[in-house]
Amino acid sequence: MSVRKLFLLPGDGIGKETMAEVRKFITAMNEKFGSGFETEEGLVGGSAYDAHGVAISEADMEKALAADAVLFGAVGGPKWDSVPYEHRPEAGLLRLRKDLALFANLRPAICYPALANASSLKPEIVEGLDILIVRELTGGVYFGAPKEIIDLGNGQKRGIDTQVYDTYEIERIASVAFELARTRKNKVCSMEKRNVMKSGVLWNEVVTATHKAKYSDVQLDHMLADAGGMQLVRWPKQFDVIVTDNLFGDMLSDIAAMLTGSLGMLPSASLGAPDEVTGKRKAMYEPVHGSAPDIAGQGIANPIAMIASFAMCLRYSFNMIKEADDLETAIANVLERGIRTGDIMAEGCTKVGTEAMGDAILAEFLALAA
Ligand code: NAD
Ligand code: IPM
Ligand code: MN
């Protein structure tokens, strides 16, 4: 039996609580199906800072690099508001993405039928929604240099961030979006701001050229990113795959989260390029939400984004398609039965905490597999 090496980084706040639910699936799959998961666990974010004075230790970085897949909870919280910028919790997440070269972040936003009423939008706007945001994750303004605050000496300071994109970075993320579109409704909408940004002009040019060279069978549209945000709340079902840069992708995916009912519903997969010899990709699976300091420690966080991120791990890192499908069906069935955490609670439903939601999905998953 093959060994599947998972490296777990629960992080801070609700990250610890939601990861505990995923651990139950890993244990059950090993015991019941002989899935062969081997897990190691590390510290990231504020938890790592408290233990080691850095947002992730070198030893844990090595384990992340050696694993078949990393499962990431969430980082951050007010406790670390005043730590030095380079050691803030979020720096651990950014280092993982950069050093593992995880340039492609897939953020599916699916509105489960049972949750059409949980969105702040009208049910007919979100019912049946199934879109995929493909966010560039290792470039743009997150990593461009210079990035600094300069003292101008006259009582003024200047904060500088730099948006940089090279052709190859745009080409490879566009290719991921086109490839994925071919497995879906065959439509890509590229979002940038070419009307004000040079990097947006290049983005548009390269996406267009990539389309023409290799993917002309896919429908391609372009939209300015601000208008794209508006269209996402006006009529989100017009989209299939959206491809966009690091910062716009961050913002547009939080908007998309609310179409699905809650930020606690949105999973993601962060993927590297396939290895030239083995074909294997480095990968990390991380919910879109953060450490939710306002509800951390209360046992009420929604674990679905984390559990659905594990389903993406089964699909993309281990090609365990039946298990991934079963897990996603289990989530849908549990929601259908009216079992809800507080963030997606509706009239007539049963309100449960993090553990009970995890247990209900696990029981359903095992029943589907039997
Ligand atoms: P957040 O995503 O932590 O929370 C935003 C709101 O959504 C809060 O009201 C929270 O209670 C709610 N929420 C989020 N996840 C939920 C879940 N699973 N179940 C129920 N409710 C949920 O964003 P924030 O408050 O802006 O940021 C808090 C910290 O998290 C910051 O330090 C930020 O940098 C960090 N952050 C980390 C990640 C990550 O680790 N991937 C992502 C986003 C933000
Ligand atoms: C996300 C988060 C991160 C980002 C932060 C915590 C660094 O908001 O994954 O969406 O901005 O990429
Ligand atoms: Mn974000």
Image (tube, grey):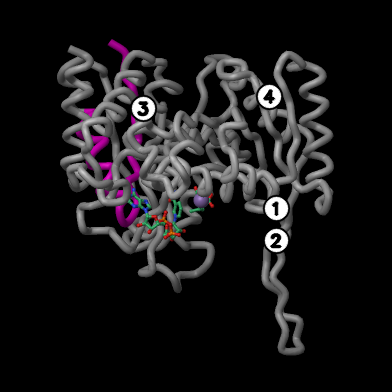
Q: Nearer the viewer, mark 3 or mark 1?
A: 3
Of labels 3 and 1, earlier in sequence is 1
Q: Residues within 10 Å of mark 4 (few under 14, many from 20)?
A: some
- Residue type marked 3: Ala
Structural distance between the alpha carbons of marks 4 and 3: 23 Å
Q: Are marks 2 and 1 in contact (CB under 8 Å)?
A: yes
Secondary structure state at the residue bearing disc 1: strand
Does the Cβ of the disc 4 residue fall within 8 Å of ligand 2? no
User: Label 2 sits on what residue type?
Assistant: Asp
Say which residue label 4 marks: 175
Magenta stretch: includes residue 242: no
Q: In the drawing, what numbered circle is on residue 161?
A: 2
The residue type indicated by label 4 comes to Ser
Q: Where in the image, quadrant-wise, is ligand 1 located?
A: bottom left
Q: Point out the stretch of residues depicted in magenta.
A: 1-26
The residue closer to the viewer here, 338 or 38, is: 338
- Of badges 3 and 2, nearer the viewer stands 3
Helix, strand or loop at label 3? It is: helix
Q: Earlier in the sequence, mark 2 or mark 1?
A: 1
Query: Is 22 or 42 nearer to us in this picture?
Result: 22
**Where is residue 238 shown, x and y percent of the image?**
62, 31
Nearest to N terminus: mark 4 or mark 1: 1
Quadrant of image for the C terminus: top left
